């Protein structure tokens, strides 16, 4: 496996989020909610302040970076969700890099970082038809809830 690391993006590197969110294949999991998402440059400063500067222990965001290829391959994050009084996590891998083990490595790196930051548990809501549910379960996440739209998985760190 190539060396994958977590990397804090600079504001100038937010072009990669724009690329992720605008790619139809990458965003196919989001089809029930409109698919791709616009992330114009006008939104970058506000996003950056919220996710990278004023985190207050409630947010963590990093790119997944392949050191061998010198390329970004995806993103990972967690955020405190007041409505559930818990931390929600997420991962998104650019479509061309899927099914190569990067999702597994990304979730492991995210869990390790969260644990180092004092986070005790995570959850994620995964669309009912998203095959990544198998990845989360393989990594020790347990299904806690299911409805017609999504499956909530949970993991103690």
Image: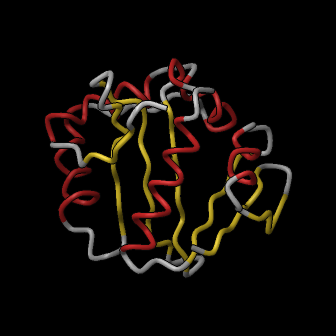
From the viewer's perspective, is residue 138 above or below residue 80?
above
* Total number of numbered discs in the rendering: 0
Q: Which of the image's four quarters has the C terminus? A: bottom right
Indicate the position of residue 50 as horizontal and vertical percent values. Answer: 26, 60
| Between 147 and 65, the one nearer to me in the picture | 65
Please identify the quarter of the rendering in which residue 28 is found.
top right
Measured as percent of width and height from the top left, residue 52 is found at: 23, 57
Name the residue at the front extreme: 1
Relative to residue 144, is residue 40 drawn left or right? left
Quick one: 41 or 138, which is closer to the camera?
A: 138
Q: Taking 35 as reference, is 142 above or below it?
A: below
Q: What residue is shown at x 66% (from left), y 56% (from top)?
A: 125
Name the residue nearer the viewer: 94 or 127: 94
Q: Closest to the observer: 122 or 139?
A: 139
Give the residue drawn at x 46%, y 32%.
Answer: 37
Query: Horizontal and vertical percent for residue 26?
Result: 54, 26
Residue 80 at x, y percent in the picture: 45, 72
In this figure, which colouring scheme has been used for the structure? secondary structure
Relative to 27, 9 lies left or right:
left
Relative height, residue 120 to residue 54 (above, below): below
Q: Which residue is drawn at 41% across and 42% down?
A: 75
Say whether residue 67 is left or right of residue 49.
right
Residue 151 lies in quadrant? bottom right
């Amino acid at each position: 496996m190539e060396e994958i690391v977590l990397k804090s993006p600079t504001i100038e590197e937010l072009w990669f989020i724009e690329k992720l969110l605008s790619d139809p294949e990458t965003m196919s999991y989001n089809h029930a909610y409109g698919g791709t998402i616009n992330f114009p440059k006008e939104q970058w400063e506000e996003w950056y302040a919220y996710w990278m500067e004023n985190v207050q222990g409630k947010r963590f965001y990093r790119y997944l970076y392949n050191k061998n290829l010198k390329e970004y391959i995806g993103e990972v994050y967690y955020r405190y969700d007041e409505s559930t009084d818990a931390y929600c996590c997420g991962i998104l891998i650019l479509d061309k890099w899927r099914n190569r083990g990067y999702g597994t490595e990304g979730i492991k790196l995210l869990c390790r970082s969260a644990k180092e930051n004092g986070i005790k548990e995570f959850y994620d809501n995964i669309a009912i038809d998203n095959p990544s549910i198998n990845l989360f379960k393989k990594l020790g996440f347990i299904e806690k809830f299911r409805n017609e739209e999504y499956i909530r998985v949970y993991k103690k760190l």
